[in-house]
Amino acid sequence: MLIIMMGQPSGVGFLVAAKSILRFGDIKDGHQRRVAEYVIIGTFLSFGWAMLTAVLMVQTIEYWRE
């Protein structure tokens, strides 16, 4: 959320890529595949929620500045 508020949304892509790379080894193992997919989906939802909240906060701050 802080990355978005600082005006650097490209940093989110870096974080998502890093998290996916860390979990790639877990996905290759068939037994842990569902757990790894669950974690990755949860991560994407968490990032999405944080980005939405940050954008709304930035818009609210800009609205109140005027």
Image: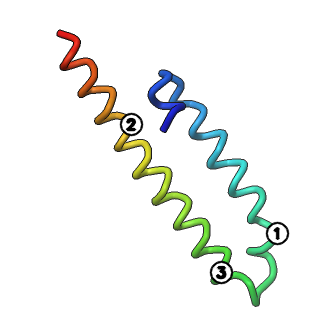
The crowd level at tag 3 (other Cα within 10 Å; few <14, some 14-19, many 20+) is few
Secondary structure at numbered mark 1:
helix
Of 35 and 58, nearer the camera is 58
Amino acid type, callout 3: Val
Sequence-earlier tag: 3 or 2:
3
Residue denoted by label 2: 54
Relative to residue 21, is residue 63 depicted above or below?
above
Question: Looking at the image, which residue is at 78% across and 74% down?
Answer: 26
Q: Position of residue 23 (x, y in %)?
A: 74, 65
Which dot, 3 or 2, sits closer to the camera?
A: 2
SS class, disc 3: helix
Q: What x and y, as percent, mark residue 56?
A: 29, 36
Q: Residue 4, labelled with which disc?
A: none
State how far apart marks 3 and 2 are (Cα). 28 Å
- Give the residue at x 40% y 52%: 49
**Mark on residue 35?**
3
Quadrant for the C terminus in the image: top left
Q: Identity of the amino acid at label 2?
A: Ala
- Which label belongs to residue 25? 1
Q: What residue is shown at x 31% (from left), y 32% (from top)?
A: 57
Viewer-nearest residue: 28 or 48 = 48
Q: Is residue 65 left or right of residue 22?
A: left
Mark 2 is surrounded, within 10 Å at the Cα level, by few (under 14), some (14 to 19) or many (20 or more) other residues, namely some
Residue placed most toward the observer, 13 or 1: 1
